[in-house]
Image (tube, helix red, strand yellow):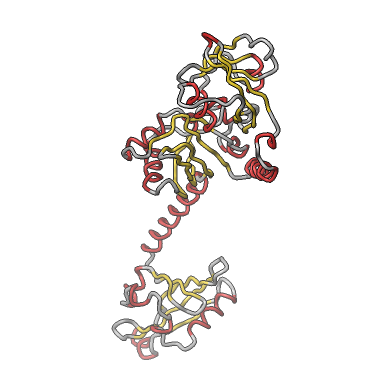
Amino acid sequence: MIRITPDLAGYESFLVDWIDETGSIVAINDFEARELGISADEKVGLERIYSSSSAQALRAIANGAQTADPAFPVWVNSRNYSEIPMVATIIRDGARGLAVVKQPLPAEVLGIGPELVERVEILSQMIGAATEACWCIEFLEPVDISLSEEEIVERVFSNESRWRACNEAMARLYRVPEGLDFNMQPVSRYFPNTEVNRKMVRDLVRANYRLDHAAAVDRRHDGSEMLVENDFRAAIQNGLLVRLWGTTRDIGPSRIREQQLSDRVDSMLDILSATPDPILVISEEGIVLAANPAVETAWGRAGEQILGRPIQGFVETRHATEKLRQAASDGEDQECDLGIVSADDSRSTWRFRSARMEGEIRRYVLTARRKARRRSRHAAEEVA
């Protein structure tokens, strides 16, 4: 819990917090609590109020590793986690520690050019308006990337971290209730420490912290699981992982559709394999693209002998491809008879039904049935 303490005399309209010799926040004034949206029961770390670089500088000042100038620039996190440039002054306040007194100043006072300010504003607007979910995880306890792979993975999930600059699309994707700030939620609520997610982080480490199309199982705000795909990037400073950011897509529906299509294909293959009639798929040019097992049974030609080759190679009827295309264009009930040369060089006549497949690429499904031989007049008379 953070202590909201009375103001320093004369500084009631300034943002003030107090830090101890370790650089930990011990108290803040009421004005800062209101401006930054900090409640009295909230656990507040230095990085909750300041940017990473400003927090590091204040920590160094608190432990004596760095001397504070009379006035120096800091970046303070606003309610929506954008960073506000301010000028700060350190005042020693007895037992309460070091008081950090701040007031906002225009960017130009801090030596930031208008072009850079405009660029940051444009990028912020682009991220905010993006339809794809954009996110950033900032490690309040940076991860040492010189550790073993498993130790890095463990610390990515166990070190203190927070969301930064996540956009509205991210909140919608995780079904965060309206009026609730995604950036204020615990990272682990949506990105849990599961074996699937640990594998993804492991892959990220092996890919030198740049990974695309990485699958993970996240949780929505209501606790339901969601299969997502992430593109990862990382910020590493002095051998420490300080930030991860990227984009996220819900791939659950597409995976379901893929599985349904796969199941449908498997069922169709089972049916085709059990069908006694030869079935072929050919291209517009008459190249055999697929064949069921009945083709080998009927004509003695294995798949590897005919796939990728012209159907005319084992059809003795001239202009076979043109006849099959014409049959498909004439309607569902149009057929044509073709003479087939089997692998043993025997000849037989088969009736082909041809149907064009849907899609931009023209392909044809052929179903063949052996045409019964006509009996000779002599044979018919003998039967009679």
Residue 286 is situated, as x and y percent measured from the top left of the image, at 47, 79
Q: Nearer the viewer, residue 170 or 310?
A: 170
Residue 332 is situated, as x and y percent measured from the top left of the image, at 56, 71
Residue at (67%, 42%) from the top-left corner? 113
Looking at the image, is 324 positioned above or below residue 240? Answer: below
Looking at the image, is 35 positioned above or below residue 351? Answer: above
Q: Is residue 375 left or right of residue 242?
A: left
Residue at (42%, 79%) from the top-left corner? 350
Residue 345 is situated, as x and y percent measured from the top left of the image, at 31, 86
Q: Nearer the viewer, residue 266 or 355?
A: 266
How many discs appear? 0
Which of the 4 image quadrants contains residue 317?
A: bottom left
Looking at the image, is 296 positioned above or below residue 42? Answer: below
Residue 140 is situated, as x and y percent measured from the top left of the image, at 47, 29
Which of the 4 image quadrants contains residue 168?
A: top right
Q: In the rendered view of the protein, which quadrant contains the C terminus?
A: bottom left
- The answer, for residue 235, to whether it is visible in the render is yes
Looking at the image, the residue that sits furthest to the left is: 344
Q: Nearer the viewer, residue 189 or 115?
A: 115
Looking at the image, is 282 positioned above or below residue 54? Answer: below
- The answer, for residue 223, to whether it is visible in the render is no
Which of the 4 image quadrants contains residue 101?
A: top right
Q: Nearer the viewer, residue 215 or 232?
A: 232
Residue at (47%, 82%) from the top-left corner? 337
